[in-house]
Image (cartoon, grey):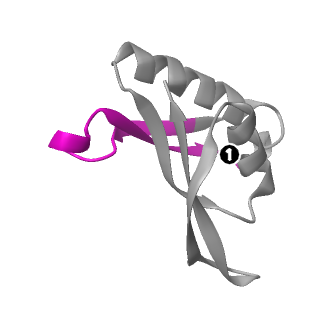
Amino acid sequence: MGTYIIKPNQIDLGSHIANCSYMVNPKYHGRGTGKLLCEHSISFAKEKRFLGIQFNIVVSTNEAAVSLWKKLGFEIIGKTPKGFRHKELGFVDTYIMFRPL
C-alpha cells in the first residue's frame, strides 16, 4: 500500500528534528493510506524523542498532500521557487513544511 522513511533531518546538531518522506501506491490514493502513514510516523517520531518533523520538499501542485499535511498539524514555513520540474506543468514551487511534536 505504501511506505515512509523517517530519519534525522540533519546529522549531529540538527538531529532533534525528523525528516519524513512518504510513498503510496497509486492504487491506494484517496483511501487514507497517506494519513495512516503520517499518523504512524508522528507516533514513531515522538517515541524516538524528536522535537518536530520537517518535510523538505512538498510539491505545491500536490494539493491533496498539502491539504492532508495541514490537517495533521503541519504548516508551510518556506518555499523554493521553481523547486520541482513537473512533467506537465514545467517548473513549480515546493514547500518546506514543519510540525512540532
Q: Is residue 65 above or below residue 80?
A: above
* Residue pictured at 61% horizontal, 23% vertical: 39
61 falls in the magenta region: no
**Which residue lies at the image location 48% right of the left edge and 23% below the top edge?**
101
Locate the N terminus and report the quarter of the image it occupies.
top right
Q: Nearer the viewer, residue 5 or 100?
A: 100
Label 1's element? Answer: loop
The region drawn magenta spans 3-26
Q: Name which residue lies at 68% across and 40% down.
A: 69
Name the spot of residue 84 as percent of width and height, x first. 58, 75
Residue 16 horizontal/vertical position (percent): 29, 32
In the rendered image, the vertical position of residue 28 relative to residue 93, given as above or below? above
Q: Nearer the viewer, residue 11 or 3?
A: 11
For mark 1, does the 10 Å Cα neighbourhood hold few (<14), some (14 to 19), or many (20 or more) residues?
few
| Residue 71 location, quadrant | top right
Q: Which residue is the site of mark 1?
A: 25
> In this rendering, would 69 be left or right of 5?
right
Q: At 52% from the left edge and 24% from the top edge, which residue is drawn? A: 42
Pinpoint residue 44: horizontal percent, then vertical percent: 45, 19
Disc 1 marks a residue whose amino acid type is: Asn
**18 inside magenta stretch:** yes
- Which residue appears farthest toward the right when viewing the image? 30
